[in-house]
Image: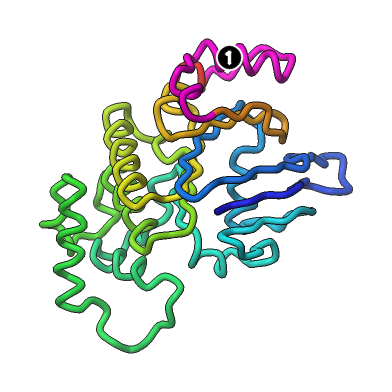
Amino acid sequence: MLKLQKVTKSFNVGTVNEKKVLHGVDLELQDGDFVTVIGGNGAGKSTLLNMIAGVYPMDSGIITLDNENISLYPDYKRARLIGRVFQDPMMGTAADMQIIENLAMAKRRGKKRTLRWGVTKTEHEEYYDIVKSLGLGLEERLTSKVGLLSGGQRQALTLLMATLQKPKLLLLDEHTAALDPATSAKVLSLTEKIVNEQKLTTLMITHNMKDAIDVGNRLIMMYDGHIIYDVRGEEKKNLKVADLLKKFEEASGEEFVNDRMLLG
């Protein structure tokens, strides 16, 4: 479903601050893979997702999604193929618009705009049922402004919007990191439910090593712009956090000292 070949990316090229962030990354995801991505600060995790989403142009390499070469596509052209949820609950929704209006926009992603009514009666009923499935009581607040929602409610809505039209690929960039532990667990559980029900191919960056082990069918670890560890299936299920720390030290030659991930 997704194939990256020799993807490289540098920032501030030609200056004293030049930094090579991705070093010829190769990665292949099968249809339905749910891959968690871990690594310390500056490992290249978010840059990898940004390359796939088309936020920045690659220096070199090829990205193929469902046998379509998207390497030169701008981000808006990839939007019809890719759903994304960001770390910041304020991103991914329009705060001054109603819940139902946000859902209607997501439903029309990649389609031509017309002068028809924004939300039909049939759509209203559809969105009511979809939002009710979240179990957050928001189905009775469809005309509320999204900006009035809590971070967890907003992140759940963003997740719903990103998957309303089944994307070829779902990108989750530490989408629970800004939430409190209880809300984070609820949003992560909802994520698993949606991904499993729709059989979505998913890449999820997380700072929580336990979540990285427990969620999905595959785990990759990044360090200094390289993928240094790739594990799946039963081997992944049997991992412990201590095993990940050991693998990191073996592959990088350094001790893992990212407090944020260790505390997570």
Residue range highlighted in magenta: 232-259
The one of 200 and 57 positioned closer to us in this rendering:
200
On screen, residue 122 above or below 25:
below
The residue located at (64%, 52%) in the rendering is 51
The residue located at (58%, 32%) in the rendering is 220
The residue located at (29%, 54%) in the rendering is 147
Instruction: Pinpoint residue 212: horizontal percent, then vertical percent.
Output: 46, 28
Instruction: Pinpoint residue 58: horizontal percent, then vertical percent.
Output: 73, 54
The one of 68 and 46 positioned closer to us in this rendering:
68
188 vs 16, left or right, is left
- Find out whether residue 23 is within the magenta segment: no
Q: Which amino acid, mark 1?
A: Leu
Q: Quadrant of the C terminus?
A: top left
**Which residue has dot 1 on it?**
245
Instruction: Pinpoint residue 154: horizontal percent, then vertical percent.
Output: 30, 49
Residue 20, quarter of the rendered image: top right
The crowd level at tag 1 (other Cα within 10 Å; few <14, some 14-19, many 20+) is: some
116 vs 221, left or right, is left
The residue located at (39%, 56%) in the rendering is 162
Tell which residue pokes out farthest to the bottom in this image. 115
